[in-house]
Amino acid sequence: MQAQAAANDNLVDIKDLKMHFPVKSNGLLRRTIGAVKAVDGLSFTVKRGETLGLVGESGCGKSTTGRAILQLHRPTSGSVLFDGQDLTKIKGEELRRMRRKVQIIFQDPYASLNPRMTVGDIIGEPIRVHKLRSGKDVRIRVEELLKVVGLNPYFINRYPHEFSGGQRQRIGIARALAVEPDFIICDEPVSALDVSIQAQIINLLQDLQNEFNLTYLFIAHNLSVVKHISDRVAVMYLGKMVELAPAAQLYVHPMHPYTQALLSAVPIPDPEIEKTRQRIILQGDVPSPLNPPSGCYFHTRCPLVIDKCRVEEPPFTDYGHGHFAACWRATEVTPILSEPIQQETAV
Amino acid sequence: MATTSSEMSRPGQPGVEEFQRPVRSLWSDAWGRLRRNKLAMIGLFYIFFLSLVAIAAPVLAPHSPARPIGAELRERGAYRQAAWVESNNEKKTGLWTYPLGTDSGGGDVLSRLIYGTRVSLVVGFIPMIFTLLIGVTMGLVSGYAGGALDSWMMRFTDVVFALPDILFFIIVQTAFGKTTFGRTFNGLLLIFVSFSVVSWAGVARLVRGQVLSLKEKEFVEAAHAVGVKNNKILTRHILPNTLAPIIVAAAFIVPGAIVTEAVLSFLGIGIQPNTSPTNPFPTSWGQMIFEGKSGIDSQPWILISSAIAIASITIAFVALGDGLRDALDPRN
């Protein structure tokens, strides 16, 4: 494992991922009359053992990205290299075997558990599907997993509706862990929970990451949560990645105007500073992904827009120290740093 | 139970009782709610009672449902009144030997009524099972497959849905009524088949709608992500979650089929009269209404008793169906 890790630092390597959903006409002919470009050309890597945060407003394609990586939606084009294997090229039995390696934790703990199955069946299903244990050992393993996620093994015969939101989310995490995956996509795993429970689940996810050497893609829209858990953070807008940087750097020195606007919206838990907080209010709405704008997708709302933005799409450029941004005026937004900013010690 | 609870309880540890609470599945919750619904429970017990009557008909019926001949016919008399009715004609005066009187051929009305329970229950349940089999399969496949297959299957379903039921039954009866197929089980088989052929469309639509919403649910996505095969996803994740509305639909299909049989028999194209004394389905309530209508002035109880029987079994199923709907979907 160690040698392999050294040989290939990137667990997941995504190149030019596109996920377009065809829009069909009604009626029997069902002609394609357009496409929703939910994800439109994403390229990024997830390093082994890290947590990559993925943020952006509702409808920007964060969740679709997660599902396209998992092949729950087959991507329109592009490649998803997982441990060197292109997931978009495999199907059937081969893909089912790969599902052991990549798992997902869902946002809504009320919709993600089958109400007609007991906790034992829900967590036991992946174990049986991949024949990891058999007979009575499945039950033993499920009890073990319940303990790992901080639930009492006595709950094994209970049904999901008997649990609270936080407990259900723990069951969802146990199900993802059941196949002993390397990579887990956390699709807004705490957005539907109370704030006090959010912290518990975040801590559980971090403990599990250390214990089982997991790699996370952490999708969220809560910037504070992402800052806390992520090593690197990627910002999406309208199906494209606008900025990707180490967490500490992104929060202090955002290079893309959209990231700046997002960050300026985060409340500061200090009433004195909060009073003086300058908010960048973006004008207008997010354009429709059915018919995105020309040039830079953000130009319709960007406070720094110039003529070039309306015509030419800015490339996703490396500005040093692993800080990528897609903006013609990135260097004007923030001066390029000479030294990388060190991650401050965790709260 | 006592030993397990003493093993589990640790003194001083809070929430121990929590573990001793019995496991409640959604089904047992629903049963608890159904049991509290008086009307539905009366319906359920009445259906249960009728099932016993149907099974034990030969023991319960005081006479053979078949029409008597010769001396017995003369003794019984045609159109003998119900037991409590006096008549100036001694041959027509009610006798407790024939509590509900006799029909035009001297057949004992009560015995016919008891045997008629069999036809009504069989004609209610068997087409219901076929209807569900066809409808649920079509709905599951159509909803889950989606795309062009779904479009075409649903257009076909629309065509079936639009068929005028009674006209279809009449055509089928006219075409097949006299063939061997049409005569099987006194014509019951033909009724089963023709009813199932037209009534599955509603179930298919219902199930498809459920599947369309369920297949987008996150627990189905989770099953895909884990690598569960499609057939397992359908049977383990989707089907169990559509069962509640299917059960409710089933409870309403049964009285529909019973009334359909009665209507067809009333029109004279339902089950065919069978005079053999050993036949298990010699008569039906619909037939009795048909006969009772013409003899309403001579012996009203043929019509009254069979009409009450059909009305009460229909009400029982509807009450049960309503109760099931409330019990299985507590949100409404």
Image (spheres, coloured by chain):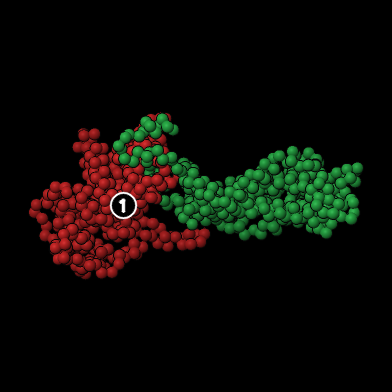
In the image shown, does A138 or B283 lie closer to the viewer?
B283
Report the chain shown in green. Answer: B
Residue B276 visible? The answer is yes
Report the chain shown in red. Answer: A
List x then y, in percent, for residue A276.
Answer: 14, 66
Q: Output the chain of dot 1.
A: A
Number of numbered tags placed on the structure image: 1
In the image shown, does B54 or A250 lie closer to the viewer?
B54
Identify the residue at horizontal 44%, vertical 33% (top origin): B1
Identify the residue at horizontal 45%, vertical 43% (top origin): B24
List x then y, in percent, for residue A149.
Answer: 30, 40
Q: How crowded is mark 1: few (under 14 residues within 10 Å), some or many (20 or more)?
A: some
| Image quarter hosting the N terminus of chain A | top left
Q: Identify the residue at the far left of this view.
A: A338
Identify the residue at horizontal 79%, vertical 44% (top origin): B65
Residue A71 visible? The answer is no
Left or right of B7 on screen, residue A275: left
List x then y, in percent, for residue A284.
Answer: 28, 69
Left or right of A230 on screen, residue A160: right
List x then y, in percent, for residue A305.
Answer: 21, 68
Identify the residue at horizontal 88%, vertical 43% (top origin): B72
Q: What residue type is labelled 1?
A: Leu
Numbered disc 1: secondary structure: loop
Q: Name the residue under label 1.
A: A193
